[in-house]
Amino acid sequence: MKYIIDHIEFDFTDDDFELPPLAQINIISEVEGSIWDADDEDDLIEEITAAYGWCVKSIDISHALT
């Protein structure tokens, strides 16, 4: 199933590394509006986390018409 990411929040907290705010904005901007192919919403979250290396705190999605 294809999903469009309408809004996403990542957990950018890490005790050993602080991602600069501009880098955070760039990651969010890159993901929002993108289309992902996943089996279900849980799989989608796992794929985004694996691709970007940050856990997803919240996500708003819609289904892409195929």
Image: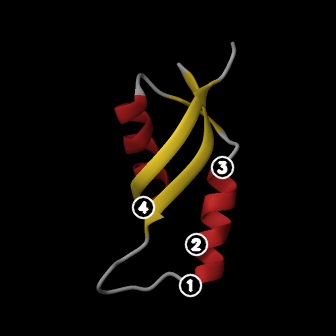
Residues marked 1 and 2 touching at CB (< 8 Å): yes
The tag earlier along the polypeptide, 2 or 4, is 2
Q: Would you say 27 lies left or right of 10 here? A: right
Image marks 2 and 4: residues in contact by CB distance under 8 Å: no
The kind of residue on which mark 2 rests is Gln
Q: Which mark is residue 53?
A: 4
Q: Which residue is mark 2?
A: 24
- Mark 1: give few (<14), some (14-19) or many (20+) Cα within 10 Å: few
Q: Is residue 60 above or below residue 31?
A: above
Three-letter amino acid code at the position of disc 4: Gly
Q: For the residues marked 1 and 4, what is the alpha-carbon distance in whole angstroms?
A: 15 Å
Q: Provide the secondary structure element on which disc 4 rests.
A: loop
**Number of on-image labels:** 4
Q: Are marks 3 and 1 in contact (CB under 8 Å)?
A: no
Circle 1/circle 4 CB separation < 8 Å: no
- Sooner in the amino-acid sequence: mark 3 or mark 1: 1
Of the two numbered discs 1 and 4 in the rendering, the one whose residue sits closer to the viewer: 1
Pointer 3 and pointer 2: residues touching (CB < 8 Å)?
Answer: no
Q: Residues within 10 Å of mark 3 (few under 14, many from 20)?
A: some
Mark 3 to mark 2 CA distance (whole Å): 12 Å
Q: Which residue is mark 3?
A: 32
Looking at the rendered structure, which numbered label has been put on residue 20?
Answer: 1
Q: Secondary structure at mark 1?
A: loop
Tell me the distance, in whole angstroms, between the alpha carbons under discs 1 and 2: 6 Å
Binning the other alpha carbons within 10 Å of mark 4 as few (below 14), some (14 to 19) or many (20 upward) gives: few
